[in-house]
Amino acid sequence: MSEIRAIRGMNDILPDETVTWRYLESTVASVLGSYGYGEIRMPIVEQTDLFKRSIGEVTDIVEKEMYTFPDRNGESLTLRPEGTAGCVRAAIQNGLLNTPRRLWYCGPMFRYERPQKGRQRQFHQIGVESFGIATPDMDAEVILMSARLWQRLGIADNVRLELNSIGSSQSRSAYREALVGYLRARFDELDEDSQRRMDSNPLRILDSKNPQTQSLLDGAPSLADYLDESSAADFARLRELLDAAGVSYRVNPRLVRGLDYYNNTVFEWVTESLGAQGTVCAGGRYDGLVEQLGGKPVPGVGFAMGVERLTLLLEAVGVQPPAPPEADIYLVSFGPAAECAALVAGENLRELFPGLRIVQHAGGGSFKSQMKKADRSGARIALIWGEDEVAAGNVTLKHLRDDSAEGRPGQLTVAAAELAQTLAGLLADGNQ
Ligand code: ATP
Ligand code: MG
């Protein structure tokens, strides 16, 4: 029969890779925990309207990247393309927004994009959302938190921070007019994508990747000159706080982000080490979003990082968390009675040494082939039950790694009743 393959752009994450994933996830959980953030888990599927209303109808995501399908009852559902919308929906629905609330989440997101390095159709984000505080100290907090994370992961030297303020929606519409006025006069020189965006979402033209469009923008009006007073003051304060904390950044006046819900602060962490897919983390402030989704007017700020891109970066930089061996202890047995003794002893040992990886040989086979498997497992010790051992109520411990320098016998046979104690002694020795 023909082989069934995974969906294009949706990858398996194999045991070799999950070591890095776990390292990343546990480091993130620890750093976010140290700032008082609590974890939330939302459904993967939501009503399509949730994303249309929050991300915006005229965005790449909603226009062409969503996995949307009718439920059996005809309702339109969508596989979440990002986490903020669902997190806001969940926070409103569950009454979490009566006090300031710091949340984080982690999980798969889905976007129909052209798969390439650092770009999948199912990818994973770790996201952070902080609700209820509109002042720039909170923007500073989430940025500092991400900076600490790079430090802890060992990639701080490989990412840099780009920062901008896109102001209030009033200042943006004044700017939009000025920008459109400037670009309209040069319409023919724009790339096709930018021409298309002129009417729908002209601010997105600012982050066009087209070099000719970019040089055309050199003479364009600057968003910074259109900021309202309070947005400008908040941005100045944020920069002051970042300076005080020693976080360096580049103000990029063309950074606008591709989602409609942002206002004031927007930022991206970018790396040069991953080619075109260089943004590993992106976020900003979204003070109108909660209200837009039917909640009270509660401000928010947050970011999301791409887990695949971060694991690629860890790899590129050579940060490699140590992979544990498949086993610490491998249980070998020969014959039905021995198999039974080994099985029972294995359960007992897992009870007594919950941190150890105790792998039971399964499927029978000769003593020699079992020992070969024991060796390949990476275990330090094999525990052996042969017919002789079982008849005498014993078990044999064999050291599989070369530690003769420590003067240990290669193997010793002990009474089954003393196994746990002997093992505890050996393991304590081995850890010195
Ligand atoms: P890009 O410009 O690379 O398409 P984006 O602006 O669409 O990114 P966001 O919606 O801000 O991305 O998502 C935050 C982060 O999630 C990105 O910075 C990136 O690290 C990651 N990300 C987004 N889309 C993908 C994808 N298709 N595959 C892998 N990671 C992704
Ligand atoms: Mg995108």
Image (cartoon, rainbow, N blue to C red):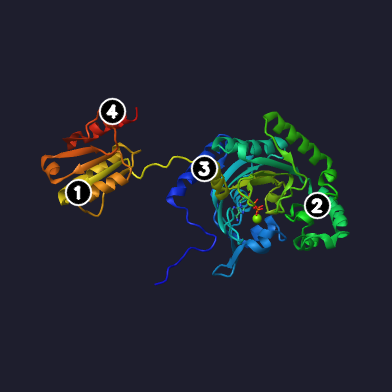
Residue 189 in picture, x, y percent from top left = 83, 60
Residue 59 versus residue 390 in the image, above or below: below
Q: Which mark is residue 215?
A: 2
Disc on the earlier residue, 2 or 4:
2
**Residue 316 location, quadrant:** top right
Q: Residues within 10 Å of mark 1 (few under 14, many from 20)?
A: some
Under mark 3, the amino acid is: Leu
Disc 1: which residue: 367
Q: Which amino acid does the dot numbered 2 rest on?
A: Ser
Q: Residue at x 68, y 37 (%)?
A: 138
Q: Quick one: SS at disc 1?
A: helix
In the rendered view, would you say 394 is above or below 246?
Answer: below
Say which of marks 1 and 3 sits in front: 1
Q: Amino acid under label 4?
A: Glu
Q: How far apart are the two marked residues, 2 and 3, measured between alpha carbons?
A: 38 Å
Expressed as whole percent of the image width and height from the top left, the position of residue 12 reads 47, 56
Give the left or right position of residue 6, taking residue 325 as reference: right
Residue named by callout 4: 406
| Residue at image mark 3 | 24
Let me know if residue 23 appears in the view.
Answer: yes
Which residue occupies the foreground of this view, 68 or 40? 68
